[in-house]
Amino acid sequence: MSEYTEIESKISGLLPKTKARTCENLDEIVRLTGLMATTTKDRYYTHSVCHLFEGYGNPRLDNRGSYLYCEGLFEAAEKVANAALMEAVKSRNFDCVTRIVYPIITYNLNNMVEGQKGFAFKPNALSDPKFIEAYKEYIDQWDKDDEFNKNLKAYQIEFCEAEEMGKFYSESLRKMQEAYGASPSKPDSAKEVSGIYVDVDDTLLTKYPDKLNNKLQTYLVRQMDDGKQVTVFTSGDPKKASEALRRFGADSRLLDVKSKSEYLGKTLEVCIDDTIPAWQGFTAKVYMHPENVQPKYVPREPVHVDKPLEITVENIPQIKQGYITKCIDYVKNKLRL
């Protein structure tokens, strides 16, 4: 284990896991961060540093703290982020840089204010021409077939190059809208749309193996039965997504798939997606990673038994008694009692 890995582990255990005005371990985190920023580095250094940022705003990593939850930690955060980003340039290893950049973009999106100058938090290395040039080369190697994701990845470079958050968001959103034929209107992040919005790839449909996410579908069906509006959307081809859902046996009410481009600049009431909404050009009042969705419990109807049982169950609520009775019948039959 390298020296910086040991330090990272100590810092990780002290970082706040929710938004905080002050941090009780601030002095110790600052001290340890100073050590980590100056320790001997190698091509895996960025991987350790990303663990100290990526927990921000990510429900999938809600057990992981982040520098971004407390402004008092920003000076320390900038030191270690600058060290990691420039080490990535030196080693030409950008595999974990997105896990630092995305949370920083998310923090800025969540803290935009009207007439804002500059950024809420942006380490100097993100604006360094050497870093931007090298990071562009890395991103250019990503999958170019997916038009939506191609534009989303360019979004990171535009953030690095931008001088003000407001102009970055407006211009990036306009380009994304134009890329999908949407009307290039003024971004309106305050415009809320009601209902539940659920992604397809790696959310309603899973991979390895390819199958329908039955747990998530159960949740959605129960929400629809309760009168809640559910919209399925995708960053890919809506027709192909709909065909895939039909092939895997999805509920017919989930087959009318929309394009995510229709929701750029809007705020969704609830979003279920494996990718954080703020990284896709829209926001959500409630965001859930598909792994964290639990189907709402619906009690079974009690099973009524016509004939008395030789083995009885006393003092158990009727809703449980019917189920246990069936189990007793099964065991009796197997044992031929």
Image (cartoon, helix red, strand yellow):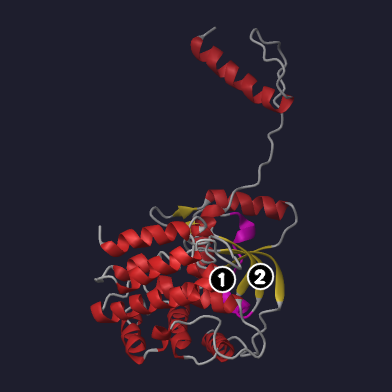
Task: Give the residue drawn at x 56%, y 81%.
Answer: 120
Contact, mark 1 vs mark 2 (Cβ under 8 Å): yes
Q: Which quadrant would the N terminus be assigned to in this image?
A: bottom left
Task: Give the residue drawn at x 73%, y 24%.
Answer: 318
Residue 190 position within the rendered picture, expressed as x and y whole percent measured from the top left: 70, 79
Towards the viewer: 285 or 302: 285
**Numbered label tally:** 2
Residue 50 seen: no
* Residue type (three-letter) at the residue carrying disc 1: Pro
Task: Give the residue drawn at x 70%, y 21%.
Answer: 316
Q: Is residue 313 magenta?
A: no
Towards the viewer: 107 or 76: 76
Give the Cα separation between the discs numbered 1 and 2. 9 Å
- Determine whether the residue tagged by mark 2 lies in a helix, strand or loop: strand
Towards the viewer: 260 or 21: 21
Towards the viewer: 83 or 135: 83
| In-image side of 2 versus 278 (left or right) | left
Q: Is residue 259 magenta?
A: yes
Q: Which residues are magenta?
A: 251-265
Q: Is residue 198 above or below residue 294?
A: below
Q: Which residue is mark 1?
A: 277
Residue 323 position within the rendered picture, expressed as x and y whole percent measured from the top left: 64, 25
Chain-order first, disc 1 or disc 2:
2
Q: Is residue 196 above or below residue 176?
A: above
Q: Is residue 185 above or below residue 36?
A: below
Q: Which residue is mark 2?
A: 268
Residue 57 seen: yes
